[in-house]
Amino acid sequence: MSSQGKEIKVTDKRMFTPEGELREEYRFLSEKSTPEADPAAPPPPPEPARPEPEPAAPRRAATLEMDMEDDPRFGPGPGPGFYDLAAMLAEPAAIYLGDAPLPDGQWAENLEMARLHIDLLDVLRQKTAGNLSAQESAFLEDLLYRLRVRYVQKQKRG
């Protein structure tokens, strides 16, 4: 093969420099990582296992609105924020899972539409990665986890 006229460009895509420093484009990861443990410090307690979600009773009212009323992150303020956006995108998923009534009191269950809205929330998670506070990221992860578990429960019944 002839190498004349062809130029090869090599780009280093590794996360760390040869000195062990995190590269600039990966600095956002250092905020999420745990600090190095002090060898003299006692080991941290083990993290509790995530409990299995309890199956929800069919046709129960969505608790999203109740959670928002008790949470200081929601409510009067300078205007809508990230939590409002995530809640707005999650509301149709609860309706299509059959966990919340429509405004006219009717019930709608459409697992394909529920899946679409769950996937839209996942797009939001992917596109905002590294730009959310730890609380916002945890809120979104928990919301997606609960909706996915509920979707799987509904899918197994149907």
Image: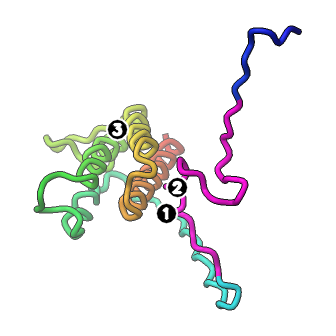
Whether residues under marks 1 and 3 lie with C-beta atoms below 8 angstroms apart, the answer is no
Task: Say which quarter of the image contains residue 67.
Answer: bottom left
Q: CA distance from mark 1 to mark 3?
A: 40 Å
Residue at horizontal 27 percent and vertical 55 percent from the top: 83
The first of marks 3 and 2 along the sequence is 2
Q: Picture coordinates of residue 71 (x, y %)?
A: 24, 68
Asked where in the image residue 19 lies, by quadrant, the reply is bottom right
Mark 1 — residue?
31
Secondary element at image label 3: loop
The colour scheme used here is rainbow
Residue 99, label in figure = none
Is residue 105 a member of the stretch shown in magenta?
A: no
Residue linked to disc 2:
27
Q: Is residue 147 visible?
A: yes
Residue shown at the point (40%, 34%) measured from the top left: 116
For mark 1, give the secondary structure. Answer: helix
Whether residue 57 is visible to the viewer of this picture, yes or no, is no
> At which x and y percent is residue 30?
54, 61
> Tags 2 and 1 in contact by the CB under 8 Å rule?
yes
Residue 40 spot, x, y in % from top left = 69, 91
Q: Which residues are magenta?
A: 10-37
Find the distance from the CA under tag 2 to the CA under tag 1.
8 Å
